[in-house]
Image (spheres, helix red, strand yellow):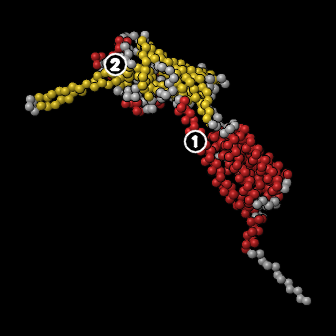
Amino acid sequence: MEQSNTPPQEPTTQNKFTNWLKTSITARMLMVGFLVIILLIPLSYINSLIRERSYRQSDVVREINGKWGNNVLVYGPMLKIPYKTYTETKTYNETTKTYLTETKTFIKHAYIFPEKLDADVNVNSKTLNRGNFESAVFTTKMDFSGHFIPTDLSSKDIKEEDILWEKATVIIKTSNLKGIKSEMVLKLNDASYSFQTNFNSDNSNKQSNLDVLESGFINAKQLSDTNDDAFSISMAFNGSEQIDIIPIGKTTTMSMSSNWADPSFVGNYLPNDETKKITKDGFKADWKVLQINRAFSQQHLNSIPNLNRFAFGTKFMVMVDEYQKSERSAKYGFLVIGLTFLIFFLIQTMSKIHIHPFQYLMIGLALTMFYTLLVSISEHSNFLKAYLVAGVSVVALITFYSKSILKSFKFSSFIGISLVALYAFIYVIIQLENYALLVGSVGLFLILATVMFVSRKIDWHND
C-alpha cells in the first residue's frame, strides 16, 4: 500500500492578511486609531447637543427677563432748553431790481447736564426658575440728587432773548421703561414735576435703545436765577442681569448695595477698592467719576449724544454655568478615548490577549455616554454631583466589561483605577482657570513618560 506525501500548501494571500491583522502590532495600532477617529462622530453630536441646550437656556433667560424687566440703564436727568435760530433767504426781484430778505425761525434744543449727580442704589436680588433654568432678577430703588448751575449759552452763540425759558423741561432716558414700578416725581428747588413718556422727544433717540421720559414745563424763573438749581428724583425698577448709569454730572458718584453675593462690576469705571465690600450676604460699592475722567462736555446742542460706552455699574448673574463646564469637559473627549484605548492596547500587546474591534467600539461608546449623562444630570443637579454620577457609572461599566474581556481581576482593576485618575484629572483642569494650561501640560507630560516607561520592553518589530 503506497502512501502519498502531500507537501504542505502555501498560505494564501487572504490567510496571510488575516493572520497579520490578528498578530501584527501595527495592525492593532491602525485599528485603534481608526476607531478613535470614528468615535469623533458621536463626540461632535454631543458637543452640538450641549450648545443646543445652552442656547435653549439663553432663550428661556431672555424670556424670563423680558417679562420681569430687562437690564436697567439710566441716562439723566438733564435740562432740555428750547431756543430760536434764524435763517435768512435773499430773493432777487426782477421788477423792482431789489433783494427781498425772508427770515425763518426754527426751534432747536440745548441739553444741559448737571453740575453734580449723586445716585444711591439699593438692589434686592433673587433668582426666578423656569423648568431647569434660572435667571437673576432684582427690584431696585434708585435715588438721584444733585444740582444744575445757572445756564449760560452765550458760549454757544445763543442770545439770552432767543432762549424759551418757559418751554424748558427735564428729561431722563432709560432702557427699561416697562420695569418702572412707581410714579416718578422730580423735585427741583421747591417745585415738583411729574414725568411722562415722549417717544418723539429727539431724533437722536434712534441712536440707542433708550426710551425718553420728559417732565412738564418747569419754572422758567428758576433757570434764569443766579443760584444753583438743586434736584432730587426717586425711581423703582423691576430689572434683570445689570444696572448701569451714565456719569453725566461734572462730578458723579454712585453708592450701590445689594443682597447679591456674586456681583460683577462692569463698564467704563470700577468701584473704589478701599470701600468695596463683598460678603456671602451681599455687597456694597461706591464709584466716583470726575469730568476729567470722561471725554464729553456739559452742554450739547440739537441732539443728545449717545454716551452708552461711558456707562458703569454691576452685573447680577447666576455664576454656575453647567453647560460651559460640560462643553469644556467634552473638549477632552478625544483625550479620554485615546488614552483609554492606549491602556487596552498596551495590555493586549504585553499580555497577548486578543481584543476584538467590536469590544473596542463598545468601550468607546461607553466613554461617549459619560457626556450625555453629565449634561442630562447637571440640568437637575449641580455639576459636581452630575460629574460623580456619570463618572462612577461609566467607570463601573467599563471595569466590569474589561473583566469579561481580559479574564483578569488585576487588569480590570488597573483599568478602573486609571479611568478614575483620568476623570479626576479632567475635573481639576475644568475647575482651574489661570493654571489650567500648566496643570494640563504637566499631566500630559507625566502620562507620556509613563507610557514610554511601560512600553520600553515591547518588541515593536514583531510584525
Q: Which residue is mark 1?
A: 55
Residue 155 is drawn in which quadrant? top left
- For this orientation, the residue located farthest to the left is 95
Against 78, is 450 above or below?
below
In depth, the one of 285 and 374 nearer the eye is 374
Residue 34 is drawn in which quadrant? bottom right
Spot occupied by residue 56 in the image (x, y as percentages of width and height): 58, 41
Q: Residues within 10 Å of mark 2 (few under 14, many from 20)?
A: some
In the visual, does 106 lie left or right of 424? left
In the visual, does 424 lie left or right of 252? right
Q: Amino acid at mark 1?
A: Tyr
Spot occupied by residue 169 in the image (x, y as percentages of width and height): 38, 19
Is the N terminus in the top left, top right, bottom left or bottom right quadrant? bottom right
Q: Secondary structure at mark 2?
A: helix
Is the C terminus in the top left, top right, bottom left or bottom right quadrant? bottom right
Spot occupied by residue 442 in the image (x, y as percentages of width and height): 71, 43
In the visual, does 405 lie left or right of 180? right
Q: Which residue is mark 2?
A: 167
In depth, the one of 438 and 51 nearer the eye is 51
Q: Amino acid at mark 2?
A: Lys
